[in-house]
Amino acid sequence: MHLTTASAGAATGLLAGPWIRAAVFRLSVPPGAPDRTACPRCGSRLRSASACRCPSCRERVTLPCGATEIASAAVLGTIAGTVGPRPELIAFAWLAVLCIALATIDLIVYRLPDQLTLPAYPVIAALLAGAALLNSEPDRFLRAVLAGIALAAGYLVLALIRPGDLGLGDVKLAGPLGMVLGWAGWQSVLLGTALSFVLCGLAGAVLLAVRRADARTALPLGPFMVCATFVVLLVTPGQ
Ligand SMILES: [Zn+2]
């Protein structure tokens, strides 16, 4: 465990908390609906999307205050402490912040908005290219790009074969996740993909067992893809 890097990661996570809360507030709307800007209770326009409570009616408008800060500090602290002060840490941390917002939105409204998934392609590619340059590991960058393309293509095939099980949002999320998994290695790509479906299946089985779901209940896949990716990255950071 790299303690100094872990502390820096946790501090960065705290600072990212308001951004995550704002993204969840703005984008937790049905597909096609405009971004949310007003209090869902009284309709007054919020000055800041990262506000926890509406200034007019004092109602909580989004996730509890502090929740996103604590979650992202814990996640980024763990990732930074495990990966250590390596150039690729910036790519992993940036993607983790984005994925906390994406997984939360997917749990609330069952969608992974393009506003968050699409920018991840150029940003993760650029951050990993920079890391590859600094580490003198061009082959690693190439593998990351190939893995991103392969995973997105694989998910696209699955979405076309079984449209009920996963959507195009999952396909678009698969690319950047595939890139960081590919950076760690092909084994990590396979492991991360398999674990996504295993975790989703387990969650479905648990919900069935406690009668919180029936056989027709659809679970969002995004949160499981995110969890699986970061678990695999932490176990096999590719060092
Ligand atoms: Zn209000």
Image: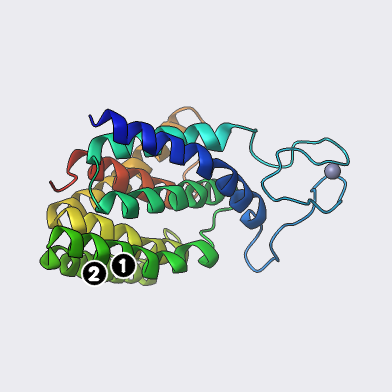
Q: Which of 221 and 73 is in front in this view?
A: 73
Tell me if label 1 and label 2 are in contact, CB under 8 Å: yes
Residue 104 disc label: none
Q: Which of 238 and 86 is in front in this view?
A: 86
Residue at 33%, 52% in the rendered image: 90
Residue 220 seen in the current view: no
Residue at 88%, 41% in the rendered image: 56
Quadrant hosting residue 110: bottom right
Q: Mark 2 points at which residue?
A: 145
Task: Give amino acid for label 1.
Answer: Ala
Image quarter for ligand 1 equals top right
> Element at badge 2?
helix
Q: Name the residue under label 1.
A: 125
Tell me if residue 27 comes above or below residue 236 in the rendering: below
Tell me if residue 72 comes above or below residue 145 in the rendering: above
Q: Where is residue 238 in the image (x, y as percent from the top left)?
A: 14, 48
Q: In this view, does 15 lie to the left or right of 237?
A: right
Quadrant hosting residue 200: top left
Residue 106 seen in the current view: yes
- Cα separation between marks 1 and 2: 7 Å
Q: Nearer the viewer, mark 1 or mark 2?
A: 1
Q: Where is residue 197 in the image (x, y as percent from the top left)?
A: 31, 49
Under 8 Å from ligand 1: the CB of mark 2?
no
Residue at 46%, 53% in the rendered image: 98
Residue at 75%, 36% in the rendered image: 60
Q: Nearer the viewer, residue 155 or 74?
A: 74
Q: Nearer the viewer, residue 54 or 15?
A: 15
Q: Is residue 102 left or right of residue 52?
A: left
Q: Position of residue 100 (x, y in %)?
A: 47, 46
